[in-house]
Image (spheres, rainbow, N blue to C red):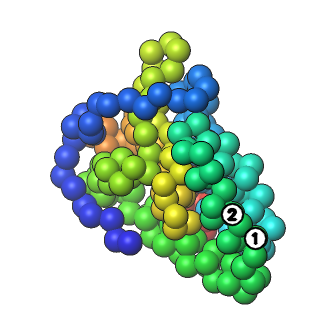
Amino acid sequence: MNLPTYSVPLGSIPTSFVHLRTPLDAASVADACRSAALAFARDAPDWRRSDLLRWLRNAYLPLTRHTAMDGAETADFTAIASASEASVRAILSAAHSEARSRLERLRDRRYAEGLGLTMFSFGFIARFEDSSGAVGWIPTSRPRRLVDRVSSLVAADLLARPVDYPTIAGVETSSRHRAAVGAYLLEVA
């Protein structure tokens, strides 16, 4: 899927909130999203089926189960568990390649803004408010393609902490920018 490039400010993303099953801290969710996306970017080329299942169950699923419909979060895992090792390796290779391309495009301000809006409009991320009133973004169980799952993690982090992404905040590229956007790219290299 080629994500469209929009020219919209982050402030124009819809403001509706989702009610989560359990209370979460917005900063902790953003940290978990970044950690899971980086793990995929760094390690996926060497994964086997068991590694992908472990990542889905331990990094991705704990985030999505807060917004999932009953049973929705396990549907794809059964298919992956029964797929051949060669099929899983092909899926991982394609998803990693496309995820890397999307991550590299984060340097483009319009693309980065469009990623968040696109992930939200597809229902791949949801906005929530934590108990302290901080706004956070969380991936949902809607994405079916692996690359969209990874992109939802990046978008949730990006929207929760736009200051870490100066191309969006309108700030000059800085060490903070390299730490956020660049970290994804460096981990993949």
Q: Is residue 154 left or right of residue 92?
A: left
Q: CA distance from mark 2 to mark 1?
A: 6 Å
Query: Marks 2 and 1: CB-CB under 8 Å?
Result: yes
For image coordinates 49% across by 59% down, the residue present is: 143
Q: Is residue 84 left or right of residue 42?
A: right
For image coordinates 60% across by 68% down, the residue present is: 189
Report whether residue 164 is seen: no
**In the picture, residue 56 is in which quadrant?**
bottom right
Residue occupied by mark 2: 77
Residue 23's x, y, as percent? 59, 22
Q: Is residue 19 left or right of residue 120?
A: right
Residue furthest to the bottom in view is 86
**Structural crowding at the residue carrying mark 2, measured as other residues with C-alpha within 10 Å and reported as few (<14), some (14–19) or many (≥20):** some
Name the foreground residue: 122 vs 37: 122
Residue 76's x, y, as percent? 63, 64
Name the foreground residue: 189 vs 129: 129
Would you place residue 82 above or below residue 67 in this image? below
For image coordinates 63% across by 83% down, the residue present is: 90
Find residue 81 and name its label.
1
* Amino acid under disc 2: Phe
Would you place residue 92 above or below residue 186 in this image? below
Q: Secondary structure at mark 1?
A: helix
Q: Secondary structure at mark 2?
A: helix
* Amino acid under disc 1: Ala
Name the foreground residue: 164 vs 143: 143
Report whether residue 72 is seen: yes
**In the picture, residue 78 is in which quadrant?**
bottom right
Residue 98's x, y, as percent? 48, 72
Residue 83's x, y, as percent? 72, 79
For image coordinates 77% across by 58% down, the residue present is: 54
Residue furthest to the front in view is 70
